[in-house]
Image (cartoon, grey):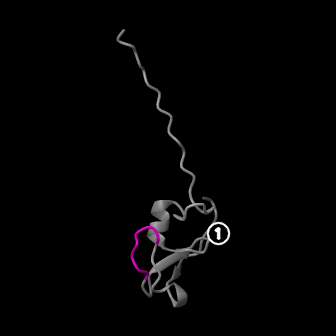
Amino acid sequence: MTDTVTVQQAAGDIVGKTCSICLSVIISGDEVVSCPYCSLPFHEECWKENKGCSAYGCKGVTEVQKETTVSNYTSAN
């Protein structure tokens, strides 16, 4: 995800909500960000570690690249 988010200290409506990544309650003064697409609040560190939103279907979710595994398979026929 390449969109910029603003880090703020938790206050008002965000206090008491749950971070969807670590599942901890956001307390007053925590550094938080809100997803620019779905507005879910996250601890700043959780957002960074997750590289974006955690809400299924949200445009703020980082696209995971599928790894391709090449296997040297030989048949034992």
Nearer the observer, 72 or 32: 72
Q: Quadrant of the N terminus?
A: bottom right
Task: From the top left corner, tell me how far across and down residue 27 is, in percent.
Answer: 42, 85
Q: Residue lying at the far front in this picture: please name it.
A: 77
Q: Quadrant of the C terminus?
A: top left
Q: Residue lying at the far left in this picture: please name it.
A: 76
Q: What's the amino acid at mark 1?
A: Tyr
Task: From the top left corner, tell me how far across and down residue 35 is, in percent.
Answer: 59, 71
Task: From the top left corner, tell me how far across and down residue 67 is, in percent.
Answer: 50, 39
At horizontal 49% and vertical 84% (from top left) the residue drawn is 10
11 inside magenta stretch: no
Q: Main secondary structure of the magenta part?
A: loop
Q: Is residue 62 left or right of residue 18?
A: right
Nearer the observer, 56 or 62: 56
At horizontal 48% and vertical 61% (from top left) the residue drawn is 50
Q: In which quarter of the view is residue 5 placed?
A: bottom right
Q: Is the residue marked by circle 1 packed among few (<14), some (14-19), or many (20+) residues within 10 Å?
A: few
Q: Is residue 8 left or right of residue 23?
A: right
At horizontal 53% and vertical 91% (from top left) the residue drawn is 12
Residue numbers of the magenta segment: 20-26
Q: In which quarter of the view is residue 72 placed?
A: top left
Task: From the top left corner, tell me how far across and down residue 8 is, in percent.
Answer: 53, 81
Q: Is residue 10 left or right of residue 4?
A: left
Q: Which residue is mark 1?
A: 37
At horizontal 50% and vertical 34% (from top left) the residue drawn is 68
24 inside magenta stretch: yes
Q: Residue lying at the far top in this picture: please name it.
A: 77
